[in-house]
Image (cartoon, rainbow, N blue to C red):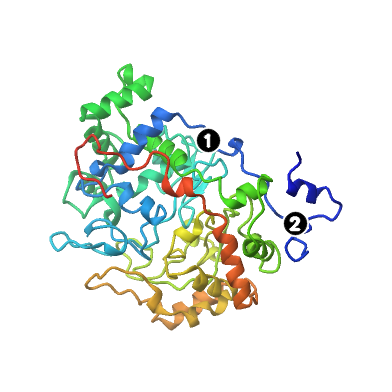
Amino acid sequence: MMSWRALVRLSGFGLLLSYGLGVWADGLPAPVTDALYLPVVRDEAELGQLLFWDPILSGNRNISCASCHHPRLGTSDGLSLGLGEGGIGLGHERVTDPENMPEQRIPRNATALFNLGALQFTVLFHDGRIEADPTRASGLRTPLEDDMMLGFANVLSAQTMFPVLSPDEMAGHYSENDVSKATRQGRITGEGGAWDVISRRVAAIPEYQSRFEGVYPEIASGRPVAFTDISNAISAFVGFEWRSDDSAFDRYLRGEEALAADATAGMELFYGKAGCSGCHSGPFQTDHGFHAMGVPQIGPGKHERFESHAQDIGRMRVTGQVADSYAFRTPSLRNVTATAPYGHDGAYASLEAFLQGHLNPSGAIVRYDRGQAILPKLDGAEDWRALDDPAEVSAISAAATSPGVNLTADEIVAVIAFLGSLSDQVALKGRLGIPVAVPSGLPLDR
């Protein structure tokens, strides 16, 4: 039997809605299919699961990937700006370790991990500093440029492993462990480099060595475990664990069921009057582009250690183009109701507040309520330097040139109801889940 949605499409009335007899604008994506994803080998994903949860990859063996990308927190950390090295606990309960104080907050909000195994995700990080580039020997454009190692299976594999080099995220403070020392000296690749140090740590654990031999035939034949093997396995896990394609909206697109009335009303706004789909387009509600939307800047900003400002100019740090100033990558909206707070720096605590700012980008920073920021106490943090600088506030506001949209309070509620229809309970829970233990024997963040 033909689905009710297919009948609507063939009725001659275009995209006629059963709700209110409204008409959708063009632009609804086709249903998500297996063809949109990288293939996953289960054994490789299971190896990646252990590595993702194992603190062995961090300089001080105290932080795992899951510490800042936890399924209980929508694969993020529930904070505006997290605490990596020097933090204890999860989410809102994360506090500083008095014996190992952080030097600063992580400058940007921890991104969600849903659907990163999809083929169209070829640009990652808030500023797109890692990107697929077939003209390079590695197939990737990264901050390491031509020094990038060969062997990363895809852009997700490369992305997963850069946090281990960050002193604030996983490497640790300068000179306090072998990873941070190598990073500080600029030794990343090659023998004795930071990635080599981590690889040797992992391979020295018999269970890991055995598992790598079972997944990668070259290792079984005698090749040492390389850092790219670790990152490729984690990439396989992330792609498998958090594939998200069975939300109410997905089932609607497949013609399996109708959306609830409020979500349908929100969908009509999203793909019509509100203009959300201008940037949040395609099967995962992102154009993978970069846009300046006037998000208030909080925290230390993005800068090199020798710089003293607290600004974050976004994409411009990568391209050097003034036109890219304060522009950040369009996030996918899959499971967005579970990934608060929002913005490149998590400035907005709720979707409603974020939408209010998004609908009038140029004026958002002036109306911003600082009480929305979810920031663990950190003595000495100057979280409001950018917002206390009139010139910086003006520059952020001026860069946001997108026209405003007027929506009523009821329309905003409807849009949020539609965003709720993008939630996939299987993906939110995860397919493999939290392992009982990891081969290093180190404690897990549960």
Q: Is residue 104 above or below residue 120?
A: below
Q: Is residue 293 above or below residue 35?
A: below
Q: Quadrant of residue 231?
A: top left
Callout 2 amino acid: Asp
Q: Quadrant of residue 383?
A: bottom left
Give percent across and percent down for residue 256. Answer: 66, 45
**Residue position marked by numbered label 2 in the rendering:** 26
**Residue position marked by numbered label 1 in the rendering:** 38
The reply to whether discs 2 and 1 touch (Cβ–Cβ < 8 Å) is: no
* Circle 2 residues within 10 Å: few <14, some 14–19, many ≥20: few
* Circle 1 residues within 10 Å: few <14, some 14–19, many ≥20: some
Question: Residue at 56% across / 54% down in the picture?
Answer: 422
Which residue of the protein is positioned furthest toward the left in this rendering? Answer: 99
The answer to whether residue 92 is visible is yes
Question: Residue at 54% across / 57% down in the picture?
Answer: 333
Question: Residue at 26% across / 26% down in the picture?
Answer: 209
Q: Quadrant where the N terminus lies?
A: top right
Label 2: state its secondary structure.
Answer: loop
Callout 1 amino acid: Leu
- Calculate the distance from the C-alpha at mark 2 to the C-alpha at mark 1: 28 Å
Give percent across and percent down for residue 46. Answer: 37, 33
